[in-house]
Image (cartoon, grey):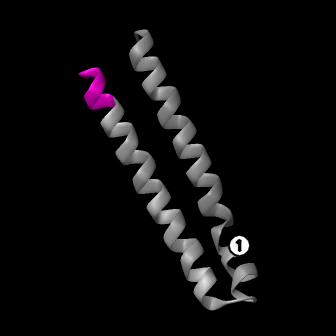
Amino acid sequence: MDSETRNAAIAAACVLLVFGFAAYYLPTIMLAVGKVSTVLAALVAIVFVLGLFVVLWLRGRSQRKKGL
């Protein structure tokens, strides 16, 4: 495994851990926010999903610029 492949694997593991951790606690966060407003609870879920897509999109753009 060369350094570029290792760095890509480490970055993928970090993204997976962060979003996995957030997804695990997302229902608890949504229930807590839902006590204030159901609209805010829905926005929390939307921001989570959009955040995942933005991170993956940025990672793809970064890889394309490197020519990988």
- Residue at screen point 30% across, 21% down: 66
Residue visible at 61% across and 47% down in the picture: 18
Q: Is residue 7 above or below residue 46?
A: above
In the image, taking residue 48 as reference, residue 22 lies left or right, namely right
Give, as a three-letter code, the residue at label 1. Answer: Ile
Q: In this picture, is 66 found above or below 14?
A: above
> Where does residue 15 sit, x and y in percent of width and height?
53, 42
Q: Please identify the residue farthest to the front as the structure is shown.
A: 65
Asked if residue 37 lies left or right of residue 62, the reply is right
Tell me residue 44's x, y (percent). 59, 73
- Residue 68 in the figure: left or right of residue 21: left
Whether residue 59 is in magenta: the answer is no
Residue 66: say if magenta: yes
Residue nearest the observer in this picture, 26 or 54: 54
Identify the image quadrant of residue 33: bottom right
SS label for mark 1 = helix
Residue 50 percent across, percent down from the top left = 45, 62
Specify the quadrant that holds the C terminus. top left
Q: As displayed, is residue 29 above or below residue 50?
A: below
Q: Quadrant of the N terminus?
A: top left
Residue positioned 46% across, 18% down in the render: 6
Task: Give percent across and percent down for residue 56.
Answer: 39, 46
Give the residue at x 65% y 54%.
21
Look at mark 1 in the image and give the residue it sits on. Answer: 29
* Above or below for 1 versus 46: above
- Magenta span: predominant SS is helix
Q: How many marks are shown on the rendered structure?
A: 1
Tell me which segment is drawn in magenta: 63-68
